[in-house]
Image: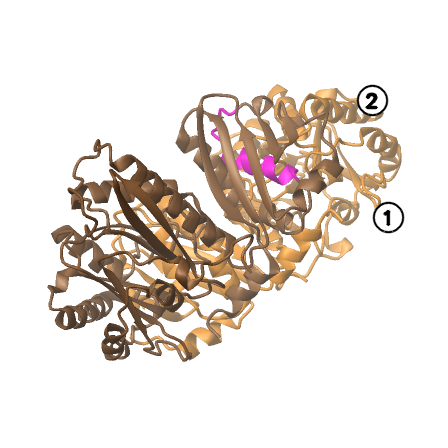
Chain colours: A orange, B brown
């Protein structure tokens, strides 16, 4: 069960004019569920993507990058769960291209107007014939209200489907934003989420959309970490169908962009936090905020250092205010010239460390009270500058080990 | 139970002329065991130390560094388990100095000839009065054959005492080396082990000893990682009492040094591996060797990347050849210009990945066969240079979570 996250109901995921979604069962794994998603965009849609920096990036990521280099006039996304098509070499790239070709032929668009995605086990050959055979059924299922079915079809170790919608007025015109995300393990900046797709009917030109996608990813998915592993497949795609009746936005300074940017960021943050809340085995959601650093990179490095410490994570799981482990994690991640005597940290409203040592006002009881919550804010003040950074993470539980020790069986 | 590590019997830890060890019960925690160790060196002993790089280093580490800056003519080590005296600010430093002063007054040496060490919970005030009160009993217990009692007194989550001895001929003279180590969690380069003390009766001048200590730490403790956390207290001390009847060694090029250096390194490697074998919850010992890199730092970064991936560690725990997780970890840790198509890796003798994809000869059965072993070598070939590096680690099990979730209770 995710930590304080209620999954959307199907009717809460609003249709986005210009987007249709359909799913089908390709039996990529030996399971009874839909596992292939086809998302079709009307002509005139622009799409932009942000992808994993893993050097062993998956075949579909390589193909997505190539297709987006050619142009942003994307007509379809095709996604399978159960197999990542990663570590599969040239055969994997050919398999991803074959899937795109099958979609292009069905929809009557160019091969390079289709973006492929895969999520699941790494280093197994993609059962491409099964996926291609399931595509006509996915096409037949295409529907404007297919978002809930879509996110359900791309889940792997997720315990709930994750998605959200927003309505926002741009200029005088109401536009819709709907986004979905999947991912529960191997979650780490950058990119954070395994797969997330957000679409809007607002008209945004391709180049501006690419800037916006990077900006939004940095504010949301790149702040989420579950276990410090950056997947080979992490992908975030932002699509703008342009169906809303208004003049296209092409300039980052366009005043109409502000409410849209804010709504897109809020939705992406909600999805990124949902991924952490549904982190494998998570029992607590922890926000780590580091203030007072020389620059944001320093703050982020320390926040990630705390987030990745297995000792800190197990202490949260145990609700044990063994807070010296946070001190230790700060000391490991900090620059060599950090002065410990200027460091303070708080657990929610409880001052734990002051001037580098235990605060005089701190009591075990106060720490214990906060640690029992399922949502906790850790705030660190470095006392040497004005920069800050935030990272969201979860605890490390027995269930994390069980889930990852048994994932393939 | 450690993975393929048989702890020494008391008589296997040989006395080192010039070293006496005694332990006592200070009740630093509410337990029934000795928890304070006093090691006394005869006049003329030289000592050198290698310490944690954690910026929140413990008070005793700060004091050790100060005392060793003054000179290498060390007369005693004083160690307590149960409390790390870390994150304790100025009061912590005063407590460490108070302990040193008590030892100096008992032994009739200078305060700065005593080195203090602490291991245990971080950010609790050191119960210095209890430790000082126990010191006369530790002094009364001083004995040349006290090594086994010594290592037993400094254990925390260790399941077995770890120590070893070697006899080696230097010139024509037989000398003895005995070393002990404690540590099972929060283990990470550099420094790796929580605490390790190695003594020899060979005469080695202070400056040369310091070089030797750094060299040996890099070959041993700095290759061991359990959970990626570098403790606030990690310390390694090498002491040379000079009791063996021979002219002192002062020059790194002294031909007599070679067999001694080799024996010291072998003993330190044995201790470092023993720490990993006794890693918290460990069920497997894994050696990660990365070859063919541009430089050793690149190889080491990739080896550590694999060693620290919770997904890789849980796959080892499950004996599940989910080896795509290793591919993913390599891809995360590698330089941006790594060419995946040149990468291969082996699990023991089984070629898993070749040219960046699954090897044609690889079978799940072959992978499964190796994964069932409790000692596994992973060898990665990057195909872009001549450098290499090795790291030792263990798996991530349910017991790791249990041990760290319950440690303080």
Asked if the stretch drawn in magenta spans residue A155, the answer is: no
Q: Describe the element under mark 2 as helix, strand or loop.
A: helix
Q: Is residue B306 above or below residue B126?
A: above
| Residue B405 as seen in the image, left or right of residue A120 | left
Point out the tag, 2 or 1, that comes first from the N-terminus. 1
Q: Foreground residue, B194 or B298?
A: B194
Q: Residue B63 at x, y = what percent? A: 20, 60
User: Can residue A294 be seen here?
Assistant: yes
Q: Residue B22 at x, y = what percent? A: 29, 69
Q: Quadrant of residue B195?
A: bottom left
Question: Which residues make up the magenta segment?
Answer: B323-338
Q: Circle 2: is it few (<14), some (14-19), or many (20+) Cα within 10 Å?
A: few
Q: Describe the element under mark 1 as helix, strand or loop.
A: loop
Q: Residue at point 83% right, 44% down? A: A34
Label count reads: 2
Judging from the image, mark 1 belongs to the subunit labelled: A
Asked if the stretch drawn in magenta spans residue B333, the answer is: yes
Look at the magenta stretch and give its main secondary structure.
Answer: helix
Q: Which residue is mark 2?
A: A105
Q: Which residue is mark 1?
A: A32
| Residue B121 as seen in the image, left or right of residue A22 | left
Have a look at marks 2 and 1 and say if they share a chain. yes
Calculate the distance from the C-alpha at mark 2 to the C-alpha at mark 1. Answer: 28 Å
Q: Foreground residue, B228 or A278?
A: B228
Judging from the image, mark 2 belongs to the subunit labelled: A
Q: Is residue A329 above or below residue B214?
A: below
User: Can residue A64 be seen here?
Assistant: no
Q: Which mark is residue B81?
A: none
């Amino acid at each position: 069960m995710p930590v304080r996250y209620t999954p959307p109901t199907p009717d809460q995921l609003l249709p986005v004019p210009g987007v249709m979604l359909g799913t089908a069962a390709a039996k990529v794994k030996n399971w009874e569920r839909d596992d292939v998603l086809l998302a079709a965009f009307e002509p005139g849609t622009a799409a932009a993507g942000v992808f994993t920096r893993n050097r062993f990036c998956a075949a579909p990521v390589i193909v997505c990058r190539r297709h987006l280099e050619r142009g942003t006039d994307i007509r379809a996304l095709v996604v399978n769960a159960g197999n990542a098509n990663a570590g599969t070499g040239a055969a994997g790239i050919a398999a991803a291209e074959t899937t795109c070709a099958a979609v292009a032929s069905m929809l009557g668009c160019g091969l390079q107007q289709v973006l492929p995605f895969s999520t699941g086990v790494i280093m197994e050959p993609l059962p491409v014939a099964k996926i291609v055979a399931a595509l006509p059924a996915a096409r037949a299922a295409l529907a404007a209200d297919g978002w809930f079915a879509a996110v359900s079809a791309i889940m792997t170790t997720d315990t709930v489907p994750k998605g959200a919608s927003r309505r926002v007025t741009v200029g005088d015109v109401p536009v819709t934003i709907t986004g979905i995300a999947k991912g529960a393990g191997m979650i780490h900046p950058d990119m954070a989420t395994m797969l997330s797709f957000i679409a809007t009917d607002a008209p945004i030109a391709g180049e501006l959309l690419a800037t916006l996608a990077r900006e939004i990813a940095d504010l949301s998915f790149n702040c989420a970490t579950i276990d410090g592993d950056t997947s080979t497949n992490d992908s975030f795609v932002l699509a703008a169908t342009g169906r809303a009746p208004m003049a296209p936005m092409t300039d980052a300074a366009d005043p109409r962009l502000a409410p849209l940017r804010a709504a897109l960021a809020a939705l992406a943050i909600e999805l990124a936090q949902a991924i952490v809340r549904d982190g494998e085995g998570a029992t607590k959601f922890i926000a780590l905020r580091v203030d007072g650093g020389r620059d944001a990179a320093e703050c982020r490095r320390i926040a990630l250092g705390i987030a990745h410490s297995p000792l800190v994570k197990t202490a949260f799981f145990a609700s044990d205010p063994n807070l010296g482990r946070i001190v230790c994690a700060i000391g490991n991640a900090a620059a060599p010239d950090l002065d410990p005597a200027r460091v303070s940290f708080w657990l929610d409203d409880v001052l734990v460390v002051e001037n580098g040592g235990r605060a005089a006002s701190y009591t075990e009881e106060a720490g214990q009270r906060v640690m029992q919550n399922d949502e906790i804010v850790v705030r660190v003040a470095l006392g040497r500058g004005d920069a800050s950074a935030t990272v969201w993470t979860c605890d490390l539980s027995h269930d994390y080990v069980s889930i990852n020790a048994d994932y393939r069986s």
